[in-house]
Image (spheres, helix red, strand yellow):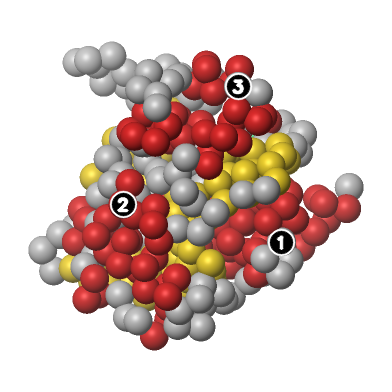
Amino acid sequence: RVVIVGSYVQDLSFYVAEFARPGETLPADLRPGAGGKGFNQAVAATQAGVPTLFIGAIGHDAAGAGARDFARQHGVRAEFVVKKKEPTGVASIAINAAGQNQILVALGANLALHIRDVPIRPLTGAEVVVCQAESDMKTAAHVLRTARRQGAVTIFNPAPMHAKVDLAILRHVEVLIPNEAEFVALVNRSPRSGLKNFTTEALLRLAPDRLHALCRTFNVPIVIVTLGARGCFVSQPDVYARVNAHGVDAVDTTGAGDAFVGGFAAGLVKFNKNVFEAAHFANAVAALAVTRHGTASGMPTAREIARFLRR
Ligand code: ADP
């Protein structure tokens, strides 16, 4: 079983011809949907065919009721902790004609998910436990520490990039999954990397053995850097390799990273903890997700993934 402790956010996606400038009001098409990194990942893992439990916080409001409806309709097992004072997280997402996005997120209740809100019982017996950086970090550290002690594989996705992740959390992490920007931010903040002005451009020019060496500086057994349309780079203590993405026509890459992380967690369970097979599977889940609009609602089913991998 997979357990994902993290964020639920109501996505308000506004489709516009071009982004508004300061002071401007523009007409838009609105598509509301379920989102939040943790929840998206839980939907991806559930639909990929592995029993998954999501634990997260919502407010006592209409958006919170929407969370329960979505979970019920999509067969996602979710334990929502209802906060009385804080509202459900909401994201305002503007998407222009070129498919680029601008996102504002008010995390609300997610930041009030306390250690005492997370029951220990689901963590015992979980094979894989996943956290992100979109909820209270003390809670995430506690969850990962507890889960690892119980023998689960712990995955940490240090997203979003602007989150000031305390590197101490990495002690409890078995698999670290950043995207390029998050990896660059971590490298610049890690004293062991010896780098302060590392950039994404520099990352793209790096030879595989150098990238592997940088991954090793985090002292985390497995580091997987997602590389968009180029797939991902997997670094384990004694082996490293890039795992290619699957060629698709992307229409909306919002939530690609979440599809990957949820798909990877499910893949670890499906493929008996084989990291490379799980990464290949995760690339397929994410490839299908980018061919559709929406985040949580764009996640593929086990049957669709199987058909895609047989192409
Ligand atoms: P994020 O959404 O966090 O920025 P990435 O852009 O690295 O994350 O994408 C995560 C994963 O999604 C990639 O590792 C890859 O598997 C898949 N992916 C993203 N963009 C594409 C694309 N254009 N074609 C195929 N797969 C993609």
- Residue 270: give x, y in percent of width and height: 71, 68
Q: Residues within 10 Å of mark 3 (few under 14, many from 20)?
A: few
- Residue 255: give x, y in percent of width and height: 51, 43
Q: CA distance from mark 2 to mark 1?
A: 27 Å
Mark before the other along the chain sequence, 2 or 1? 2
Q: Secondary structure at mark 3?
A: loop
Question: Which of the numbered marks, if any, corresponds to residue 168?
Answer: 2
Judge by depth and name the residue closer to the eye, 99 or 4: 4
Query: Which amino acid lies under the numbered mark 1 shown in the image of this protein?
Result: Asn
Residue 209 is at least partly visible in this image: yes
Q: Is residue 45 left or right of residue 284?
A: left
Question: Which of the numbered marks, if any, corresponds to residue 274?
Answer: 1
Mark before the other along the chain sequence, 3 or 1? 3
Q: CA distance from mark 3 to mark 1?
A: 26 Å
Q: Residues within 10 Å of mark 1 (few under 14, many from 20)?
A: few
Quadrant of the rendered image containing residue 144: bottom left
